[in-house]
Amino acid sequence: MKLYDVYPLFDINIVKGQGCRVWDDNGDEYLDLYGGHAVISIGHAHPHYVEMISNQVAQLGFYSNSVINTLQQDVANRLGELSGYDDYQFFLINSGAEANENALKLASFYNGRTRVLVQEKAFHGRTSLAVEATHNPKIIAPINANGHVTYLPMNDLPAWEAELVKGDVCAVMIECIQGVGGIRLVTPEFMQGLRELCDKYNTVLICDEIQCGYGRSGKFFAHQHAGIRPDIITVAKGIGNGFPMGGVIIGPKFVPVYGQLGTTFGGNHLACAAAIAVLDVMKQDALVDNAAKVGAYLMEELQKLPQIKEVRGQGLMIGMEFDEPVKDIRRKLLFEQKVFTGVSGTNVIRLLPPLSLSMAEANEFLERFKKVI
Ligand SMILES: Cc1ncc(COP(=O)(O)O)c(C=O)c1O
């Protein structure tokens, strides 16, 4: 059987990881400024993570959500404390798209409405309503195009108010730092205005923190830079450091009803062990502060390079926009300098390293990067 060929692949087989480095099957070492697409939060093969998962799988890998699983509450306790949301509720699933589907479902159960507003260039996932809420017609199949979603310009509050005032908007879904969209940031004023408008028109404010959250922006959540609290927050990627997981963080005004949401795999024992290990390490090693510090340093240094048209970002979520396509730079970085990076569109290089990136590793990246631009 052949694999369904949807990924344009680099001809590299990564077989091992440690901290912010990975190795291929030839034994070549790479610096990882990509984190497997913002997934590796605490670094590859962290000893506490390895121990927690190994012990858990030896004890019990999975049992269903029909019995008590105290590990889920352990995750929620740690997450509530570290994020400042201990008065919210937590629902665990398996991926980012699934987190957004559930968030939108909850919003619609809450106010009975069906319209959703998202940003132009938004990316919210590849399933059902999440893909309809993704501003890319190429990946929205006819079966997904059900007219629920309006795409609006980022930071243009009057344009959002003009829709919200109609009183039929179920939810607003926002990435405070757009990832796929090219590392574009909302302004605090826009988020504060949106918060007020959502309250006024009984619309649910959802922050998709799947890429920009979980410490990446230098605060636990990117929306915390604007000093607001959304009604629902969605998380995935870094939550399990590679173990497939997603979560919906749900405000106090939502009252759970038995059977309203559900999942077979979500919140299983092994996933929870991974998530607990991640939060333990984030706390012990102050990784959110590290992301703020190392990210600020990287941005400052990158801004000195005249070859780059614009450097955007926050914490360890950084975009470098060039006048020309970045394909060649990225290839040279990868094959000559042995550095993994990400990309947004054609002209933006995206840096999404583990939150544990050290200053020395940041300098190592800068040195290698300067050789190829
Ligand atoms: C902001 C955002 N939302 C949602 C998703 C979808 O997550 P998943 O691929 O885990 O379904 C992604 C993935 O890149 C993302 O960046």
Image (spheres, helix red, strand yellow):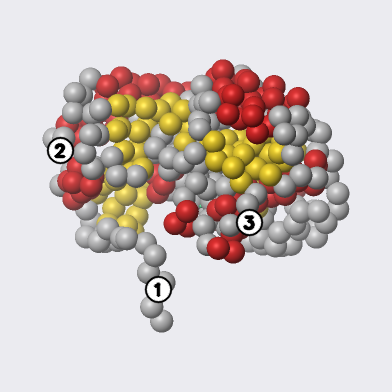
Give the residue at mark 3: 146
The crowd level at tag 2 (other Cα within 10 Å; few <14, some 14-19, many 20+) is some
Inter-mark Cα distance, 1 to 2: 34 Å
The percent position of residue 61, horizontal first and vertical second, equals 63, 61
Whether residue 7 is situated above or below residue 131 in the rendered picture: below
User: For the residue labelled by badge 1, is the local secondary structure a helix, a strand or a loop?
Assistant: loop
Q: Is residue 43 above or below residue 28?
A: above
Q: Position of residue 72 (x, y in %)?
A: 71, 47
Which label number is shown at residue 372?
2
* Residue at position x 76%, y 44% in the image: 113
Q: Residue at x 80, y 60 (%)?
A: 66
Dot 1 or dot 3: first in sequence order is 1
- Going from N to C along the chain, the mark reached first, 3 or 2, is 3
**How far across and how far down the image is residue 8, in percent?**
32, 60
Q: If you read the primary sequence from the N terminus, does the residue marked by circle 1 or circle 2 appear first?
A: 1
Nearer the camera: disc 1 or disc 3: 3
**Real-space Cα distance between discs 1 and 3?**
30 Å
Tell me the quarter of the picture where residue 298 sits. top left
Q: Position of residue 90 (x, y in %)?
A: 72, 42
Point 71% across, 59% down: residue: 263
Q: Which amino acid type corresponds to the residue marked 2 in the rendered image?
A: Val
For mark 1, does the 10 Å Cα neighbourhood hold few (<14), some (14 to 19), or many (20 or more) residues? few
